[in-house]
Image (cartoon, rainbow, N blue to C red):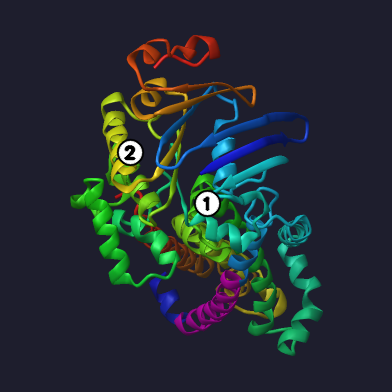
Amino acid sequence: MLKLFIDNADKIFSSLLETVVMLVISITIGMIVGLVVGVFITISDENGLAPNKYVNKILGTIVNVTRSIPFILLAIILIPFSRFVVGRAFGTLAASVPLTIIGCALFARFTEQALKEVNPNIINSGRVIGASKLQIVYYFMLKEAAPSIALGFTSACISIVSYSTAMGILGGGGIGDFAIYHGYTANNFKLMFIVIIIMIIFVQLIQMVGNIIAKKLDKSRK
Amino acid sequence: MIEIKNLAKEFISSNSRKEVLNNLNFKINKGKIYGIIGPSGAGKSTILNILAGLIKPDNGEVFVEGENIIELDNNQLRSYQKNIGMVFQDYNLLSNLTVLQNIALPLKLAKVKKEVREQEARKVLEFVNLSEEENSYPSQLSGGMKQRVAIARAIITKPKILLLDEVTSALDQETANVIIKLLKKINYDLGITILLVSHDLLTVKKLCEYVFVLNDGKIVDELELTSDEILGSFNYRKELGVSDA
């Protein structure tokens, strides 16, 4: 098994690099957009800081619809959009587009869930001490929910890793595509299992980093 | 100082409509300690939330030092709220900030310099007798300590009025007594007017000078707690169905 790994190390690492490129793009953009969208969904709720049923419904529906479409179909539907954004329909960069879109939806939903766990009275106490809406969002919502957001984002990252394995359909390459193409279809199951072990280690690392960040942010368990 | 006129408020949900306050009237004088008692759901907390500018009534006027706070826009309301301190039953401290950071937060939000706000926070911390806990996190404190931190945070901006929502209800009697003593000190030393709502009659008896009895959204009685005789006849528990202390 080790010999098989060493023989294929070059290809495995270049596939891993493609996965990392797709993940860095989709996770970075997804986190920023998802955080903002999640905050807007939460504060626009009828009991939120700035109720607005139109903003709430529209954003909530976009997030739900995006998450409802089977991911491979979403990637296919988005081919024209990917071509518009990155100038091509296939390749690692093009495959990053649907991953980023699903990433935005996942991060938005996890942000919303974490923010809804914050005690509403804490937000009221912020209002009484004269905090602006922006200050309430930052100090009383995001900071309070930071450990939950970190754990939610970790789960979202792991889901995106999982989605990235399907990106062979858009010629995105990546470690998952390598396992299917060089492992499963080439009847080389040992190679496929090597990749699976690498993926397991990869996901464990993400979970470990997420747990450490969440623990560092959480002072309530001191 | 505070005059409430014809205040009405109802809460509407998808399948019900509940009238919480109905033609409520009362006055509060500067520098005194007032209590509002009544059974759960009588509208006690709603009065505080209206006074704190957290919710608007459906009808009526709330004059605070001559200004009708119901007519204030958002900016005016934030300016008014600088004169208000509010403490809740469940403390509402930020779990990821230290005691000192929690107390200094109102000053931080008002963009006061770090050295000044920390100096002020330490003074208030000393006033509530918690100097040794400045670097602790709320999770490391007892209920009584958390409540003292919440009180310290409420008074750091030197408010004119302190609104207290069931501040001793989650505490044992011994701890409640410490809080009562602290609140009396705040009233006496800092001249802050206090309005407490509670269903804990013992706290009201020990702390307040005047008491409004609220039932079905209306003031049904007013008492001045100045003599033992009145204290002795102060038995609304049974009448209002309030649980025994």
Q: Chain of mark 2?
A: B
Report the magenta residues as a range: A9-32
Q: Position of residue B14 (x, y in %)?
A: 77, 35
- Residue B51 badge: none
Secondary structure under the numbered disc 2 in the rendered image: helix
The residue that disc 1 covers is: A123
Q: Is residue A25 magenta?
A: yes
Residue lying at 68% horizontally and 52% vertically, measured from the top left: A45
Q: Position of residue B43 (x, y in %)?
A: 60, 30
Q: Nearer the viewer, residue B70 or A170?
A: B70
**A183 relative to A59 in the view: left or right:** left
- Check disc 2 and give the amino acid type: Leu
Quarter location, residue A73: bottom right
Q: How many marks?
A: 2
Q: Chain of mark 1?
A: A
Location of the C terminus of chain B (image quadrant):
top left
The residue that disc 2 covers is: B183
Residue lying at 42% horizontally and 10% vertically, measured from the top left: B233
Secondary structure under the numbered disc 1 in the rendered image: helix
**B94 relative to A68 in the view: left or right:** left
Residue lying at 55% horizontally and 35% vertically, measured from the top left: B27
- Check disc 1 and give the amino acid type: Ile
